[in-house]
Image (cartoon, rainbow, N blue to C red):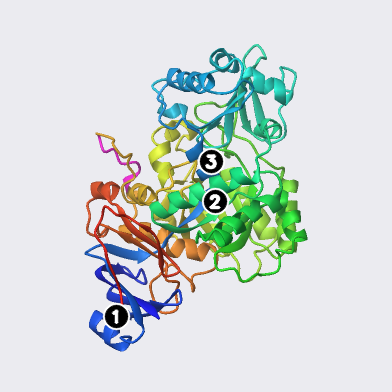
Amino acid sequence: MGTLWFGGSIYTMVSEGETVEAVYTSNGKVIETGRLSDLRSRYITEITHEYDLCGGMMIPGLVDSHMHLIGHGESLLRLDLTTTRSREELLEAIQQRAESSLEGQWIIGEGWDENNWLKADIPTSAELSAVSPNNPVMLKRTCRHAILVNEEALRLAGIDNNTPSPQGGVIEKDMNGTVTGYLKDQAQEIVYGILPKVDDLYLENALQTGIKSAWKLGLTGAHTEDLSYYGDFKTTYATFEKVINQYNMPFRAHLLVHHTVIDEWKEAGHDKPKDNPFIQFGAMKIFADGALGGRTALLSHPYADDPSTNGVAIHSKDELHALVQKARSFNLPIAVHTIGDLAFEQVLEAIEKYPTPDGTRDRFIHAQILRKELVERCKDLSVIFDIQPRFVASDFPWVLERVGTEHYDYLYAWKTLLRDGIALAGGSDAPIEPLSPLLGIHAAVTRTKPGDPTHQVFIPEECLSMYEAVSLFTKGSAYAENSESTFGMIEKGMRADFTVLHKDLFKASHDEILDTKVVMTVIDEKPVFLNEETPIICNSL
């Protein structure tokens, strides 16, 4: 019993521009591609369903190579601050939420970014307390490497003017030594540690919300890192198993395992491969530095707009090497958050000292600011750069003033990296950035901000072709998890996971990318999302 797909532009992604007229699938796999008449006659007795794409575009299922799936679901359920354009708007949003909240209930907001404000004037804990005097407040910056908290949250966390910054973090204080409520990187953990514990129902709701959102955006899977943020590893992993398997919500979840829960992972016996088509474990996740927004990404030179700092190293060199060595003891690759070039260099040294296990690939996540010598050293290693194209739309032009340009050869230099032979995968880092892969593709091919009336292109020579951009979220994501023989292309033996769009991206203008709708998302040969507003015809035979 199988399914015939036809009636649109079907791009296999095997090579640039390659299309087929039809695809026949069975038991969740691509059986054959070719001419519609040939496939229909050859499998006439086996075809049980036919899908006429009605002129749409079908590509291999899009997979986000780096995100936080439960965190994305949470962001859809919490106070959304992504659209605030001033400190006044942010304070007003907190006040409104406080007025409708029970006394003592935590107010948690997501996604504020002072770089989008008319004036980058970050509120203090006292100002937050003025609009929310009876509720502790925690507001996550868009990068998730900094939070704002009010005085009640500081009190509950035991943070005062005498509290020193922890290693790998910053408790910001003003010139008088007064805590401002702005906590960066590891300093956030002090507050996270006293948040009310979430229950199973909360996690299930957040994960279901995240998966439904991903389906609607055309995603068939994601490499996601969630296992260390919600209490113990066992509970969070059980949520994935329950929602995806028991609640019948198919989604290809490739789980990165944060180093803080790797021992729990090992003790639970997950170091032994398991036959689960939807949930697989990937690399051990490590953070090497912070983010550019809070000037905690670790650079080899001082920040151009604040020479007093060059960022924050989350771990000492010895600690970083010990973590890599530990991953190798479990025969695991590593996936390391490295935004600044010095962080990248320190991880590179660790990989050179403790080589990547055979048959796996280490990944540098973000890899935004680099020097040529570092890239050259990567060419002989089994690595991939896990990039987030949408960061271009969010970070430019302010990032140029922040880091300066004279010291660095690669600034979000995706095209140059491809020319250098570096393998790239594409993700969103949602909820840090919007989850939509179409926004990532648009950023990769245009290097512009959607809605910018000037259409300013940031470092135009680094624009990718459409084929290269789509490859990031198909072939690139497959390569990152060593599954290039399993998915990422439409050819015999590959998964029958597809994304169907109402426009042909290879023929669309750049502006049309943003208007493109997802028609259907298919996982394991079965539609999990069908856009009722767009035409598609299904015949059951």
Horizontal side of 522 relative to 184 (left or right) equals left
Which-is-in-front pick, marks 2 and 1?
1
- Tell which circle, 2 or 1, labels the residue nearer the N-terminal end: 1
Q: Which residue is mark 3?
A: 74
Q: Nearer the viewer, residue 399 or 159?
A: 159
Question: Overall secondary structure of the magenta stretch?
Answer: loop
Which-is-in-front pick, marks 3 and 2?
3
Q: Which residue is mark 1?
A: 34
Q: Amino acid at mark 1?
A: Gly
Q: Nearer the viewer, residue 81 or 326?
A: 81
Residue 86 numbered mark, or none: none
Residue 225 appears at what percent x and percent y?
59, 51
- Mark 3 vs mark 1, CA separation in Å: 43 Å
How many badges with numbers are in the image? 3
* Magenta residue span: 454-460
Residue 378 shows up from this direction: no
- Mark 2 vs mark 1, CA separation in Å: 37 Å
- Tell which circle, 3 or 2, labels the residue nearer the N-terminal end: 3
Q: Which residue is mark 2?
A: 365
Q: Residues within 10 Å of mark 1 (few under 14, many from 20)?
A: some
Was residue 54 drawn as part of the magenta stretch in this picture?
no
The C terminus appears in which quarter of the rendering? Answer: bottom left
| Residue at x-position 55% and y-position 53% | 224
Was residue 458 drawn as part of the magenta stretch in this picture?
yes
| Residue at x-position 65% and y-position 11% | 176
Residue 438 appears at what percent x and percent y?
35, 51
Residue 368 appears at what percent x and percent y?
49, 46
Question: Where, by quadrant of the figure, is residue 262 drawn?
Answer: bottom right
Q: Amino acid at mark 2?
A: Ile
Q: Amino acid at mark 3?
A: Glu
Q: Nearer the viewer, residue 210 or 288?
A: 210
